[in-house]
Amino acid sequence: MTTRGRRTLIASASVLLVAIAAIAAVVTFASSPQSSPSGQGPANTRSSAGGTSTPSAGTSPAPGASAPSPTAPSVTPAPSVSTVVPASKPARVDVVTTFAGWNGLSHAVEVGGYAAVVEPVGTCTLTLSHGDLVVTRKHTARADATTVACGGFSIPRGDLSAGSWTAVLGYRSPTSAGEASAVSLTVP
């Protein structure tokens, strides 16, 4: 090998060694613990016999410092997908009609009952139907010791026509709902 060839080989090897040393320094710096906030050197480290810093056994990095970790594989997030979460249905409760009929003294249809649940908030609904004619009334339910009362519906004769009507009492709250069986009544 010529002198010029040896010089080129030595120069190439030197450049290669400098590049490897630079890469090693970057990797070592990137994976070493951060300095403590006071600037007194790496946090929670001790010198080993070889003179390099290693994390102390049984300690965790100081707040704000990161512990060395292996390079994590790259993770590509999944595409965002819009999902529809169905609203939960209210629990089914029994509703009972306790009275429904024509009151000749008040000249009105009167209906009452209860829902077999005890809760502070709910609405009672009365639906009266006669052919294509439908009359609906609502009012706030009243909780008692063992049920929710749905009494007090009074529909005056002026809002109704004579004939056979069907009454359905219902109850609904944010957590429960139900409907009584239809009751037939006659308006004179």
Image (cartoon, rainbow, N blue to C red):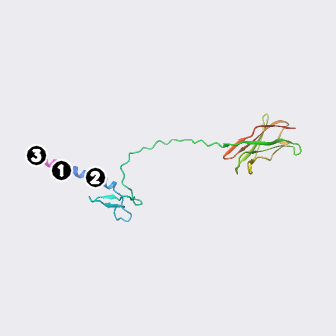
Q: Residue under circle 1? A: 11
> CA–CA distance between discs 2 and 3?
33 Å
Q: Of all residues shown, which one is farthest toward the top?
A: 131
Q: Residue under circle 3? A: 2
- Circle 1: element type: helix
- In percent of the image, x 21 and y 50: which residue is there? 15
- In percent of the image, x 32 and y 61: which residue is there? 46
Dot 1 amino acid type = Ala
Pick whichever, 181 or 77, lies toward us.
181
Q: Of all residues shown, which one is farthest toward the left?
A: 2
Dot 2 amino acid type = Ala
What secondary structure characterizes most of the magenta part? helix
- Mark 2 or 3: in front is 2
Q: State left or right for residue 76 relative to residue 121.
A: left
Dot 3 amino acid type = Thr
Q: Tell me: residue 26, above or below residue 131.
A: below
Counting labels gives 3
Label 2 vs 1, first from the N-terminus: 1
Q: Residue under circle 2? A: 24
Q: Tell me: residue 187, above or below residue 37.
A: above
Q: Position of residue 121 (x, y in %)?
A: 70, 50
Q: Tell me: residue 28, above or below residue 87.
A: below
Q: Position of residue 34 (x, y in %)?
A: 36, 59
Q: Position of residue 66 (x, y in %)?
A: 39, 56
Read off the magenta span.
1-13
Crowding at mark 1 (Cα within 10 Å: few <14, some 14-19, many 20+): few
- Mark 2 or 1: in front is 2
Toward which corner of the image does residue 128 lie, by quadrant?
Answer: top right
Looking at the rendered structure, which numbered label has been put on residue 114?
none
Image quadrant for the C terminus?
A: top right
- In percent of the image, x 27 and y 53: which residue is there? 22
Crowding at mark 2 (Cα within 10 Å: few <14, some 14-19, many 20+): few
